[in-house]
Amino acid sequence: MARPRPGQLPTLDRRSVLKVLLAGAGLAAVPGLAACGSGGSAASDPNTVTFGSNGSDAKPKQAYQAVLDAFAKQSGGLTAKPNVQDHNAFQQNINSYLQGTPDDVFTWFAGYRMQFFANKGLLHPIDDVWDKIGGNFPQAVKDLSKSTDGHYYFVPIYNYPWGVFYRKSLFAEKGYEVPKTFDDLINLAKKMQGDGLSPFVQGFGGGESWMLLGTFDYLNMRTNGYQFHIDLMHGKESWADPKIKSVMDSWKRMLPYYTPGASSKKWEDASAALVNKTGGMMVIGMFVGQSFTSQADQDDLDFFAFPEINSQYGTTAVEAPMDGFLLSKNPKNLDGSKKLLEFLGGAAAEDTYLSIDSSNLAVNDKADTSKYGALQKKAVQFIADAKDLSQFGDRDSDPGFIQNVVEPAFAQFVQSPNTSDSLLTQIQSQKSQYFQS
């Protein structure tokens, strides 16, 4: 699962005229409008379901193909034809994709990100699918699979936590201790820098400015609490509030310890510093495990909760995005699509996927977790112990607002920290284009 993104939407280079025209509707236009949709004769074949996938990286691509192969073997003649797109491009084109000729079933994200498109009438409800798979999932997962109209639109396959990832052997070698507070974190970063390391491994170039959202989310939840953060994401709080200025001030303390040239690196490239131990820590999702190709390196990967800033809120809020599948509004093969979704909502599909891509966690109660490694077991407990779960910045808010306004502002802030006040004012001034007061 290459991200994020998480969701995880990149900063987009949109044509200004189209952006202005569509901003009021909360929709964004991008170049290459029909780039993702397959349509055509394959989609009209009663024995074929088209499957749009953002799993373009090696592990997720292989895992999804294995799942589709398993579906074909038990479907009685049905096959699912994958249409794999670059992960970031898929996100960039999602609005035009859904309004054009989308694949029957496609990968997407739970919660607000799904609800946004459901509320626009761009998805097909799947209550009848959930009548058959509902017993496989806990209530929290069911809730994230519904839209505000009470209907189901989403079938989940996995989730994963965001945290501060590091190499256990590096910490042991250098005598580093896991920080409990934000001050401890900054002091640790200072020590790492003194030891010649890049303390905070970071990369947000190549259309991956969504990577910055994870740090902001944790800083805000740790400073102002989960509910304030969610209200901010939903447009109910002001970005000019002094509470957000406090968040940015904390973020400024981290910036001197960021990877040099982070704005020109993708997360995949930046994570090499974590693998080769030239970097100390990385605020990222568990999908960073895709960068660790040897079993020994994977076994050495660990994470800790983003540290406490305000004792009132502690570290009880956790980012744990959930990925899965949606049904397009007018699928060419409705019956076949629902059969595919029923299969995807079963334990066999999760088991097949996770047997290849172990950087995620099953959300199906009946999935086989007996082969989980230490990192997966820790992540399961980490999520289970959380008081509140967020879905990640670009999944908890209006997608156009995050892509067009917030991500570019954050990217500018990281490179020019003294612009934070003006950038917050700018974000607030543009918020009304996306949220009704």
Image (tube, grey):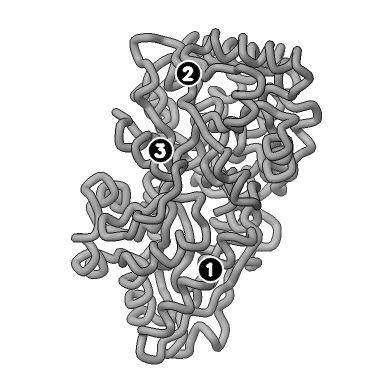
Residue drawn at 52 percent across, 12 percent down: 182
Q: Alpha-carbon neighbours of circle 2 within 10 Å: few (<14), some, or many (≥20)?
A: many
Q: Amino acid at mark 3?
A: Lys
Which image quadrant: the C terminus? top left
Residue 121: image x %, image y %?
38, 59
Residue drawn at 45 percent across, 39 percent down: 161
Q: Please tell me whether mark 2 sits on a helix, a strand or a loop.
A: loop
Which residue carries the number 2 mark? 307
Q: CA distance from mark 2 to mark 1?
A: 38 Å
Q: Amino acid at mark 2?
A: Pro
Q: How many marks?
A: 3
Mark nearest the camera among 1 and 3 is 3
**Left or right of 147: which side holds 357?**
right
Which residue carries the number 3 mark? 378
Which residue carries the number 1 mark? 52
Evaluate if marks 2 and 1 touch, with contact meaning CB atoms under 8 Å apart: no
Pick the front one: 85 or 373 = 373
Q: Amino acid at mark 1?
A: Gly
- The tag earlier along the polypeptide, 2 or 1, is 1
Pick the front one: 236 or 260 = 260
Residue drawn at 35 percent across, 37 percent down: 383
